Image (tube, rainbow, N blue to C red):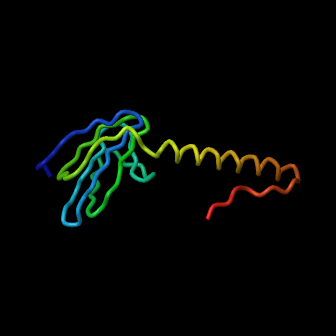
Amino acid sequence: MTTNQEFISLKAGEELRVEVGFDQKFWVKLNTGFAECFGAELGKREEYGFSGENFAIFSWEGCELQIWEFISKYVASTTPMYMCMNIHLALQSQRISAKELSDKDMLQASPRLL
């Protein structure tokens, strides 16, 4: 897989957005740092293939990616990941509060999501 090869560096808090058609194939490999795709961490030096998808690869700390066979891609610094993290932290805080209250024999329900 050496055709159409490119190295992309993502800074902390940036994401690589990719649009891949159904008749196309996109390959990515994480060389350094940490990155995730929809919350699933990418393994270092593992190749991942995608077809027929629009997705983003996000890095909290920065990373270097190696990509092949790209069609439409761009790096974005505006990302919804911080909003997702804030929601996660708020829910986790409510869970901890509910557990502490239930340990004191006070009935308190933890947050529920549908």
Residue at 52 percent of width and 48 percent of height: 84
Residue at 81 percent of width and 55 percent of height: 108
All told, the count of numbered labels is: 0
Q: Is residue 78 above or below residue 38?
A: above
| Residue 17: percent from left, percent from top | 32, 48
In the rendered image, the residue lying farthest to the right is 105
Q: Quarter holding the C terminus?
A: bottom right
Relative depth, front residue between 27 and 16: 16
| Residue 64: percent from left, percent from top | 29, 37
Image-quadrant location for residue 85: top right
Q: Is residue 101 above or below residue 11?
A: below
Residue at 59 percent of width and 48 percent of height: 88
* Residue 112 relative to residue 11: left or right: right
In the rendered image, the residue lying farthest to the front is 78
* Residue 81 relative to residue 47: left or right: right
Residue at 21 percent of width and 60 percent of height: 25
| Residue 23: percent from left, percent from top | 19, 66
Relative depth, front residue between 105 and 55: 55
